[in-house]
Image (cartoon, grey):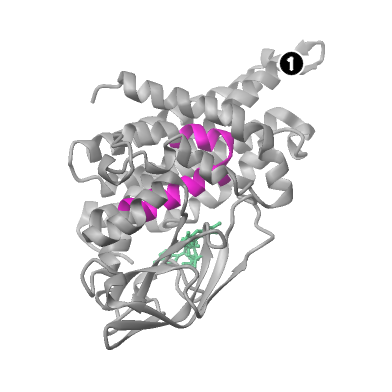
């Protein structure tokens, strides 16, 4: 793998860094306190091209590669993980999945709107009773003439209150993951209600919601991919999604490093900047090694995808390592800040709170280990 960035990749990274400096960083603390990112930001993310970065140009995307996507995602994660999540879900989990599995009409209906930010997507897999064991979900879609009628509930859905379209997973057949199908459900469909989930530890600016579906009627043409293949649709989306989460974690870890280095140079105790103490340098150098390791694991996934190779296990390794590293790095940075790290006028407390969920969603750290273990041993230990 060539670790030197191409001109296009470097331009994408610079564009994202400028965007974050102008449109995200100045507001991140206020959005965190208000528990809401400014909704107008979605259109700006679309206008600058981030919501269609890896989509084909014929559907309003810019046809960028996955390494460019990682670079943009890292910068967004460095600025505000709540903003990073909007893009990772609407583009990474929803639009990319429509581009991969959708028929021509589904692509023409949704991709240009998702790429421009005129529409937002959300990914409805988790239910109140089924998280890690997503294949046993109970939301049901029953065929009725040329339509399906859907009943059930979804929870923890990122972009849930904002979304215009839900990529929804529902049971159309018997038990187990072979009975699951995927649907594109307009969020304003009669019978679909949503409730914002408040009080999150981190990602407080993100519009996380519970969705309830009562007799929601969609045409049969709303099914994405073949009937009974919904679990494969979900898993293919999540495998790429894990790269995006990992890239966001690199951003958190890099932000923790930058903040710790800056503060250690400014803060003096016992007559010297705290940067002069070996134990403080140990905290900082451990963060720096984690940043590099997480970034390289993440770039490898992008490289595998861009070369058309198998990437799912590499994505689980990157997500596992980068998410645990982001928590470690933010925690160490907070230690460098001492008591000031504990109040939100300084950035590191938010980094730690935002990092914490990364080891939980899109497959917990335990689930990533089971995926890696299954690939190595050939034995499923789920
Ligand atoms: P559980 O599955 O109940 O797990 C509880 C614990 O048991 C964990 O430690 C887990 O690792 C462990 N465990 C479970 N099974 C095993 C096993 N076989 N072996 C060892 N340990 C095991 N979901 C969506 O569909 N769309 C979204 O957009 C979305 N966004 C989210 C945003 C946030 C802020 C949060 C918090 C969650 C989001 N989720 C979303 C849901 C997320 O993916 C789930 O929370 C996650 O998959 C874990 O499921 P669970 O919370 O039900 O935990």
Residue 126 position within the rendered picture, expressed as x and y whole percent measured from the top left? 45, 68
Question: Relative to residue 80, is residue 102 drawn left or right?
Answer: left
SS assignment at label 1: helix
Find out if the beta carbon at label 1 lies less than 8 Å from the nearest ligand 1 atom.
Answer: no
- Up/down of 339 relative to 15, above or below: below
Q: How many marks?
A: 1
Residue 208 vs residue 60, the one in the foreground: 60
Give the position of the C terminus as an image quadrant. Answer: bottom left
Residue 36, position in %: x, y? 66, 51
Q: Relative to the observer, which residue lies in front, 330 or 109?
A: 109
Instruction: Name the side, left or right, on which 347 lies relative to 121.
Output: right
Pointer 1: what residue?
266
Q: Is residue 227 left or right of residue 5?
A: left
* Observer able to see residue 114: yes
Crowd tier of the residue under label 1, counting other residues whose Cα lies within 10 Å: few below 14, some 14–19, many 20 or above: few
Residue 186 counted in the magenta span: no
Q: Quadrant of the N terminus?
A: top left
- Please tell me whether residue 77 belongs to the stretch shown in magenta: yes
Furthest toward the bottom, the residue is: 144
Residue drawn at (43%, 52%) of the image? 90
Q: Which residues are magenta?
A: 73-96
* Residue 196 x, y percent position in the rendering: 63, 65
Residue depicted at 50% across the width and 48% down the height: 85
Residue 368 showing in the rendered view: no
Q: Nearer the viewer, residue 258 or 328?
A: 258
Q: Position of residue 286 (x, y in %)?
A: 53, 27
Residue located 59% across and 52% down the image: 206
Q: Does residue 96 lie above or below 50 as drawn?
A: below
By secondary structure, the bulk of the magenta-drawn segment is best described as helix
Depicted 307 relative to depicted 353: above or below? above
């Amino acid at each position: 793998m060539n670790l030197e960035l191409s001109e296009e990749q470097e331009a994408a990274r610079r564009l994202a860094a400028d965007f974050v400096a102008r449109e995200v960083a100045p507001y991140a603390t206020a959005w965190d306190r208000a528990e809401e990112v400014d909704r107008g930001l979605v259109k700006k993310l679309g206008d600058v091209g981030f919501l269609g970065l890896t989509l084909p140009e014929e559907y309003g995307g810019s046809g960028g590669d996955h390494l460019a996507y990682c670079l943009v995602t890292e910068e967004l994660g460095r600025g505000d993980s709540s903003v990073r999540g909007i893009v990772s879900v609407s583009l990474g989990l929803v639009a990319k999945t429509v581009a991969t599995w959708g028929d021509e009409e589904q692509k023409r209906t949704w991709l240009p709107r998702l790429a421009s930010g005129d529409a937002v997507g959300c990914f409805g897999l988790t239910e109140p009773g089924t998280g890690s064991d997503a294949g046993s979900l109970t939301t049901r879609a029953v065929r009725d003439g040329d339509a399906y009628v859907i009943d059930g509930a979804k929870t923890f859905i990122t972009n849930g209150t904002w979304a215009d379209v839900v990529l929804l997973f529902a049971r159309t057949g018997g038990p187990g993951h072979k009975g699951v199908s995927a649907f594109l459900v307009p969020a304003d469909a009669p019978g679909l209600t949503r409730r914002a989930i408040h009080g999150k530890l981190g990602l407080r600016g993100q519009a996380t919601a519970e969705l309830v579906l009562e007799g929601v009627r969609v045409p049969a043409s709303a099914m994405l991919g073949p009937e009974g293949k919904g679990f494969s649709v979900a898993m293919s989306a999540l495998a790429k999604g894990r790269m995006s989460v990992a890239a966001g974690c690199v951003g958190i870890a890099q932000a923790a490093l930058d903040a710790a280095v800056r503060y250690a140079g400014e803060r003096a105790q016992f007559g010297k900047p705290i940067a002069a103490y070996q134990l403080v340098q140990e905290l900082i150098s451990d963060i720096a090694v984690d940043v590099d390791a997480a970034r390289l694991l993440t770039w490898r996934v992008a490289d595998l995808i861009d070369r058309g190779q198998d990437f799912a296990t590499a994505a689980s390794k990157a997500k596992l390592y980068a998410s645990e590293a982001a928590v470690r790095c933010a925690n160490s940075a907070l230690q460098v800040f001492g008591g000031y790290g504990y109040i939100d006028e300084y950035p590191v407390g938010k980094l730690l709170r935002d990092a914490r969920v990364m080891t939980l969603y899109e497959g917990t750290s335990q689930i990533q280990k089971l995926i890696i273990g299954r690939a190595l041993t050939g034995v499923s230990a789920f």
